[in-house]
Image (cartoon, rainbow, N blue to C red):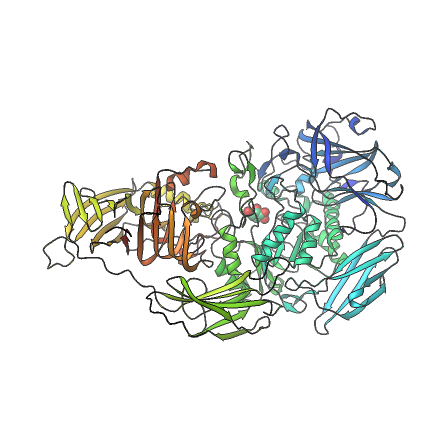
Amino acid sequence: MSAPSWYEDVTPGRGVLPPRAWYAHSDTAALSLDGTWRFRLSPTALADTSFAAEGFDAGGWREITVPGHWVLQGKDLGTPAYTNVVYPFPVDPPRVPTENPTGDHLRHFDLPDEWPGVGGAVLRFDGVESCARVWLNGAELGEFKGSRLPHEFAVGPLLKARDNVLAVRVHQWSSGSYLEDQDQWWLPGIFRSVTLLHRPEGAPGDFFVHASYDHTAGTGTLRVECDVPGRVTVPELGVDTATGEAVTVRVAPWTAETPRLYGGTLTTAAERIPLRVGFRTVRVENGVLTVNGRRVLFRGVNRHEFHPDSGRRIDPETMRRDVELMKRHNVNAVRTAHYPPHPAFLDLCDEYGLWVIDECDLETHGFQRVGWRGNPVDDARWTPALLDRAARMVERDKNHPSVILWSLGNECGAGAGLGAMADWIRDRDPSRLLHYEGDRSCADTDVYSRMYATHDEVDEIGRRADDGPAARRSLPFLLCEYAHAMGNGPGGLSAYQRLFETHERCQGGFVWEWIDHGLSHPVYGYAYGGDFGEELHDGNFVCDGLLFPDRTPSPGLLEYKKVIEPVRIAGAGSGTGNTEGGAGDTVRVTNLRDFADLSDLAFTWSYQIEGETVASGPLQVPALAAGQSADVPLPSAPERVTAGERTWTVRAELAADVPWASAGHEVAWGQSRVSEPVPPTPARGARADGTGGRITLGPAAFDARTGEPLTIGGIPVTGLRLDVWRAPTDNDNGSARRPDERYGPLWRELGLHRVRHRTDAVSLDAEDAADPGGDTLTVVTRVAPAARDLALRTVYRWTSDGTRLRLTVSVTPEGEWPLPLPRLGIALGLPARMRRVDWFGGGPGEAYPDTRAAARLGRWHRTVEELQTPYVRPQENGARIDTRWVELGDGKSGLRIEGDPAFSFSARPWTDEALDAANHRSDLVPGDTVRLHLDHVQQGIGSASCGPGVLPEFLAVPVPAEFGFTFTAPGTP
Ligand code: GAL
């Protein structure tokens, strides 16, 4: 057997320089080598390296853009592949398959005229997946692994003024691939920048900015270590000191809420490097993680680097957009799952204010499938590679105030290699805390971290009543992943937030994850696993973000924004939105921030009748300090003669522009109901008339045989019947971890997607027994799936006052129901032209019983198309909760439906069956009918696609139920 090639040995590389701090620019010259390169793809790892020789003619090669992944740059360049846990190649570490797509990259370049002569220079690669072997002007520089880490080579003596030739060979697979088994697309290529940096004689090899904050004294201490002598100046602080010297001055601290950075300069004989200093101190004190002496609560997200067109090649605008979107949605923390991000992203976190868990480029999850045999983190031969990765992360990112925890990696099991990494990091940077989730002994960490723990378990941990090692109970707790945002959901966020606010030790969490990794596709819209013919794949598990692939916020992000809002505004009533606390005509405002007061916010009040704002004005709220509350008086309720439900809405907006949003941006809101919903007025008394196979009752005509309505107010109505099924969400479908909560398949097995409706009786009765005539059309049915002896006995009672038509539905379960229902309501078809929708209820967005915090009571308008939430894999979506009434119209006629009690509605241009059958958005084609669902109950959503299921209070357990709707056709007699 031949000896493994360099890319198959366990070493991290050869010929590279020691890692050092990354900074965007200094006063030394730099030349970007990004742009168009020559490229050749081979299906296997070639031995021939002649392309790297000077004079090689690559004129026949195609062109490619660097940075970029080659599989995203041409149909003939291979395809992306998605797996979550499993390696897409045989597990035989450190060997990789012979089929090892290999990209040879070539680029000629001249030095710019102003380049300061030949001499010291380094060539920097910010990210290459999965490894690279590099030549400059025919001389081999070396090779490296570690895809999302920087690597530099000293190249000074090799540079020429003109026609330098840089040759880079990249293999898709290497021993490093075993360390990079993150749940994402496998995307080979030089995907981050390549830069030539001038390094004049005497320029620093590296520097380390230590900037701590003493909250008791209000002072910061700055010390910049540097391997060459220099001076450190921070003019704003009057600091002018030698490198290595500590200086203590009065400063404003850096926090994610108040990201105060001080501009400075590190001046050495050969280079002036701009510094951005943020003073802060991170500690664990009495079992609580503190920054600057205060407990912090992480309102976090896990961010993979992703763009639907360019994969992990992220441009600066996209990074900025991510940070701005996070800030606008009240997110205050990011875990860089599961590798160090592009370093410029951390500059933005420093600048805008986000707490960062910086995670090492390390995951060996696929070894779990083979019983963890051969796991690199438990095999000393790999330890140098692990240490190299730890060092490259820490050295690159150590000067960012935003980074407060280092994470050893993700899902690697346990082993001595992790301990070695932890020891090295602790020694090099004792100022930050260590995170790793995969080892419950917490041997190497400063925090107890878990993913997808249930609410009950978090509560137990919060009470320090969990079992496990005693030492672990003295650690702060965080959920490095929770609330799996796959498809519709996640549900249950509010309940988690209550736990984080109740238990001091529970310091929040990081939703999995920030963005759907759907790749742009000419037919499907967005592609997911399997769409490229991968032999092993994990389907749409790669689309589990709070943003759609195009970075439009999904309803999940809007829900999260509301749940984690930094100001709680709680009124008197119990309406949609906030419900707690407060006395009659005051509103209770609580500053839930950790540091900042409320002086940056302007508050307003408004008063609604039936969802229409009739009066509004500014509300004076004191600039409460972090953690404080106040009862703020509301003005006297505006007098109006109009009848209707009354609400107060109080909003907190930015008082002035900030870097991430303009003045007026809404940060938080609360609503309270002053009066109860006004039930629809009774509709009875009109006589039914049955002739010619039809029954007429008020504005409606029915089929006398089936009892089904045919028209209401002249508008055709089709297929009105009990509705108990929904196109399963990803969370309904659940995961193998909780077989009892895989409701999607269980509902199907029970046959809920194909229930039969038997009509047992259609009769005209009198509601009043003394009345001999017929004013009530009663339709008795039995709704049941084939092959089962259980049923829902359903009675429809129709009455009218001549104009209004009232339906009361009574449902009685028969037999042993083994499962909760997806929903319980009725559905009906209307002509497709009825596509304008107005409603009074929760909105404007989608909401289910456990994803409803962001739904506020109001008057809303959408078209049927706009009511659809375009999940990448189509599934149940678009329900509007707490609806008092909804009206569908075509601009001329309309059908209005009032609920008693309030209901949830959805309206789609296709059936639930079509929605269920669709795999991609492109499979959904509008038909000639709008399907309108009027639900008395919908089951909650949960997050069982990876985490816990629906909380018991949100399960739609079959019980006897009665609910009513009143139909009117405005404009008809
Ligand atoms: C976690 C893992 C993530 C992702 C998530 C499910 O176990 O750390 O990378 O796979 O589950 O989407």
**Side of 837 relative to 247 (left or right):** left
**Side of 777 relative to 245 (left or right):** left
Up/down of 610 relative to 904, above or below: below
Residue at position x 41%, y 44% in the image: 744
Residue 588 seen anywhere in this rendered image of the structure: yes
Quarter of the image where one finds residue 661: bottom right
Q: Nearer the viewer, residue 13 or 274?
A: 274
Residue 245 seen anywhere in this rendered image of the structure: no
**Side of 789 relative to 251 (left or right):** left
Quarter of the image where one finds residue 188: top right
Q: Which of 745 and 221 is in front in this view?
A: 221
Residue 924, how many percent across, how many down?
Answer: 43, 38
Residue 62, how many percent across, how many down?
Answer: 70, 28
Up/down of 688 relative to 638, above or below: above
Residue at position x 31%, y 52% in the image: 896
Q: Which of 532 and 327 is in front in this view?
A: 327
Quadrant location of the N terminus in the rendered image = top right
Residue 341, how many percent across, how many down?
Answer: 67, 48
Tag count: 0
Residue 495, how many percent across, how many down?
Answer: 48, 61
